[in-house]
Image (tube, rainbow, N blue to C red):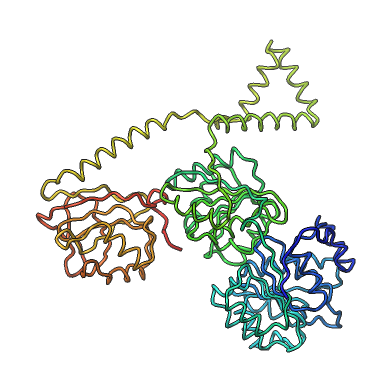
Amino acid sequence: MSQDFVAEMVTDFSELGLIEPLLRALNSAGYTEPTPIQAKMIPHVLAGNDVVGQAQTGTGKTAAFALPLLNQLKPTKKATPQILVLAPTRELAIQVSEAFKSYGANLNNLRVLPIFGGQEYAGQLQQLHLGVHVVVGTPGRVMDHIRRGSLKLSTIRSIVLDEADEMLKMGFLEDVEWVLEQAPKERQIALFSATMPDSIRRIAATHLNNPVEITIKNKTATAATISQHYLTTNGFNAKREALAKILEAETVDGMLVFVRTKMQTVELAEYISELGHSVAALNGDIAQSQRLRTVEQLKSGKLDILIATDVAARGLDVERVSHVVNFDIPFDTEAYIHRIGRTGRAGRQGRAILFLTPRERTMLKSIERATRQKIEQMALPTVAEINAKRIAAYKNTISETLSTDCSFFAGLINDYCSENGTSAELVAAALAKMAQGKTPLLLPEEPRRQIRRERTERTDVSQKRSTEQRPRKGRHVGLPPEEGMDRYRIEVGEVHGVKPGNIVGAIANEADISSDHIGRINIFEEYSTVDLPYGMPHQVLRLLHGARINGRPMRVRRDEEATQDTPRKFDRSGKNGASKGQKPMKSVQRKGPGKSRSSAQPAYK
């Protein structure tokens, strides 16, 4: 039975038949009107029906199953598992468990336990032994506990499969089916998924009993409460300067900044911290306990900015996140949707900003098609706008200080003015200068844009000449690798009929590297060089080593001395040696992502 959402539905949680302790918890949290998925789903779950819900992230689906399941929780002498929720990631498992605790805050002795990999077994085993009502876990860790006998499913009354399509993508569906096969035959199942591929429908048909299907059709794939803008920039340094200006010009409560690599999270966090902001990095290399503490600090206001890889793209629900910045554009549209879904949730206003290089405009169009929303271009805040905000903030600080008792200092200033014949205005100016210290209050106007344009024009002319004129014998052409790039040598050159497109295609296809991440290419008579992102994984280089161009193996090796004047060749030992008389034939300038990375950070996680 399929039911689509229609307008004029339940407008108050009190109309849904929930018990009073749950209504009090909702009222305390400020929730009065159910979302469409909640209004349609809760009555069916309360009635004991199996349900299939299709809704995007951020629509309030957690409450759609948590509230009615808590409503039906049966008291026992010792807490036994009655509700099992399977989630694809540890972050989502933590979020769902916290939601259960929040909604059940007024229930007597409710015990909720999240279990997931990366966390020691000892604590989980102890909590399971003491007894819990609700278990929220990732499929792998849930399976481990079932096999150990520490998690017994005989008392389970309800099972929730949250974000089933994501579990499919992560290869968890076989694990999910195994867990379902261990559960009692008489149990209620709620399945939630943003999309409904055939494999998800097969699970529903196999394990659910005549389920009620509820689809919430959104006009857009992203919440209407999120304003989306993009900013055209290029290079890591330019991006971080733009981020610094945005932090100064906009009113930010909490901010998530998504970058592509683990090293970038650390480097960017250090840069933002030096500007005086409370910031932390979050990536897969950080211990799970520290990651949990970091998220709690963001929630409590001890941190304002989190620089993260996509490890935080799912399951992170922090109410005070007002901004999401895509410092690096994600590789797919779904990742973009999930990233910006961390703001503008449950009716709150949010702002998403995408940093975009000129080469990435095609991806922007793909995102707009996927979200069915136009992403507007924004201008970088000007120095004048930032200075105006700084002045306003300074004046506001004065007003706040004047609202306190300043009588002692007022008398002190009056005495000073009388003794020295100085006006109160000049004394106030001197005190303001003392308080500001050596750090200027205002940013200087920097007429650097014209200089950069002239320098770029000169560089373009120089590069054009270098490609048009054949260099002298024995002279190495091409500039050093761009910032954040390494140079590699491949044993295919002009005499083998190689062209830049052959090199780009081979690398992109064999190693699954976007052509945007391939930098400058120099083609010589018998070999070529290509600039690739810093920190290329060894397994990728091994793959490229045997790849072929025009029937010849590439034999990719690091070209550590490629910026020297004399071109080189590799001897059989793999060491570099001088190649006398080797003429470089072609130099192709490809502006890949090199300038978007510092030389100290890898391009891969």
* Drawn side of residue 543 relative to residue 368, left or right: left
The answer to whether residue 53 is above or below residue 339 is: below
- The foreground one among 468 and 445 is 468
The structure residue drawn at horizontal position 35% and vertical position 54%, both measured from the top left corner, is 485
* Drawn side of residue 256 relative to residue 21, left or right: left
Question: How far across and how far down the image is residue 480, in percent?
Answer: 28, 49
- The foreground one among 592 and 555 is 592
Quarter-of-image position of residue 510? bottom left
Q: Quadrant of the N terminus?
A: bottom right
The answer to whether residue 134 is above or below residue 59 is: below
Residue furthest toward the right?
Answer: 20
The structure residue drawn at horizontal position 84% and vertical position 62%, both measured from the top left corner, is 13
Quarter-of-image position of residue 134? bottom right
Question: How far across and how far down the image is residue 412, in percent?
Answer: 75, 21
Question: How far across and how far down the image is residue 57, in percent?
Answer: 65, 62
Question: How far across and how far down the image is residue 76, in percent?
Answer: 86, 82
* Drawn side of residue 238 relative to residue 414, left or right: left
